[in-house]
Structure formats: structure tokens, C-alpha cells
């Protein structure tokens, strides 16, 4: 069983913002695999279903970004999964170009408060993550303001394609392993 957690903020005002790209990926997976996202528990909205015959639990934490670890920890404890092998976290990343995907098997939070909180709650950084490039913040602009802002139309088009690629990458992680997914998807957006 895999837990796939997409990070974001729950309020309507945050829909389609850079910081909520993890929620967008979960929504794309739910649509692709016909998984209903309606159950509310573990401080999250969750959906249970299958990807390529493998049972998955899709998770959209409702704790706000900075407390994502509370929800992720609760889901892991309830389903008793090995988070080093069966947890995939999807988050935005301002250090990657718009549309770029980077898959990692472990690593630091890279300044991302949602990942930082998950690492704090798990006690380690050894879990898979799919980092979604949202572009570097413009010089002089506040980081929080930038990540809570919306994409310009041309970047939104790129991100819509990137969300589809991330959903496909997660299927590869599940069916062929993270190394295969990294080989296929850790490229510049235009190469994918």
C-alpha cells in the first residue's frame, strides 16, 4: 500500500496557487484512477483506490502547510505503512523552474515548511518526494506572498502538463520503483 500525500492549504483562497500544486497532483491522480476524495479523517481529505493494481491512499492534509506532518503521521500510523518505502509526498519547489519535476528518495526540506514539518513528525528524511518546480521568486518579492500567489496563464499551462507528468511519474514509482521514475522524469520540463 502506498500513501500519496499532496501538500497544500485547505481554504478556497489558496486554490490554484503555487503552494497548492501538491493538491493539484492528488486531484489529477484521483480523476485518472477514479478515486473518490471525500472522506475526512486524520486531519485530511483522503481517497482510497488502486493504481496499477496497487492499493493507494491519497491524502490532502487540511492542517495548513506548516503542520502537514501532523496529518501525514496520523495516516501512516493508521495504515501502518513503512514510510521509507510506501510514502510519496508531492510539494512545490521554488528552486526548480516552472514545470520541472524532481523525484527524490530522501533529502532535506530545502526550506519548505511542509516538508520540514513532515521530517519533524517522522524523525527522519527518508521518504520519497515529488518536487514540483514553480519557479524562483522574483527578487525583492516576499517568499510567502510568491508561493501563495497564482501562476500567470502561460506558466499555468506548463504546470497543468507538469501535474499530468507527476501523476504518471507516481505510477512509475509504484510499478517500477523510484529509480526508474527518476530516470524518466528528473529532466527539464521541455525534455519530458
Image (cartoon, grey):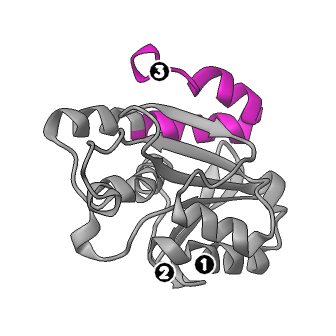
Residue 184, compared with residue 93, is above or below; it is above
Instruction: Nearest to the eye among marks 3 and 1: give it.
Output: 3
Q: Position of residue 76 (x, y in %)?
A: 74, 72
- The image quadrant that residue 10 belongs to is bottom left
Q: Residue furthest left?
A: 153
User: Which stretch did the figure color magenta?
Assistant: 163-192
Residue 40 image position (x, y, % from top left): 50, 83
Kindly identify which numbered label has been placed on residue 71.
Answer: 1
Crowding at dot 3, Cα within 10 Å, few <14 / some 14-19 / many 20+, comes out as some
Q: Which residue is mark 3?
A: 188
Per the model, the C-alpha gap separating discs 3 and 1 is 32 Å
Main secondary-structure element of the magenta-colored stretch:
helix
Q: Residue at x 18, y 32 (%)?
A: 154
For label 2, the residue is 63
Q: Going from the N terminus, do you reach mark 3 or mark 1 first?
A: 1
Labelled pair 1, 2 in contact (Cβ < 8 Å): yes
N-term mark: 1 or 2: 2
Q: Which quadrant: the N terminus?
A: bottom right
Amino acid at each position: 500500500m502506498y500513501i500519496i500525500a499532496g501538500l497544500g492549504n485547505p481554504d478556497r483562497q489558496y486554490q490554484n496557487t503555487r503552494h497548492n500544486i501538491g493538491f493539484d497532483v492528488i486531484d489529477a491522480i484521483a480523476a485518472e484512477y477514479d478515486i473518490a476524495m471525500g472522506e475526512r479523517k486524520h486531519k485530511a481529505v483522503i481517497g482510497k483506490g488502486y493504481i496499477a493494481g496497487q492499493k493507494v491512499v491519497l491524502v490532502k492534509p487540511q492542517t495548513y502547510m506548516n503542520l502537514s506532518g501532523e496529518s501525514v503521521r496520523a495516516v501512516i500510523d493508521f495504515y501502518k505503512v513503512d514510510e521509507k518505502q510506501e510514502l510519496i509526498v508531492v510539494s512545490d519547489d521554488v528552486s526548480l523552474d516552472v514545470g520541472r519535476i524532481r523525484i527524490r528518495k530522501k533529502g532535506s526540506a530545502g526550506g519548505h515548511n511542509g516538508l520540514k514539518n513532515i521530517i519533524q513528525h517522522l524523525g527522519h528524511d527518508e521518504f520519497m518526494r515529488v518536487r514540483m518546480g514553480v519557479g524562483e521568486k522574483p527578487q525583492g518579492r516576499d517568499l510567502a506572498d510568491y508561493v501563495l500567489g497564482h501562476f500567470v496563464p502561460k506558466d499555468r499551462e506548463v504546470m497543468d502538463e507538469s501535474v499530468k507528468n507527476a501523476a504518471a511519474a507516481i505510477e512509475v514509482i509504484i510499478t517500477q520503483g523510484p529509480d526508474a521514475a527518476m530516470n524518466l522524469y528528473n529532466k527539464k520540463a521541455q525534455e519530458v
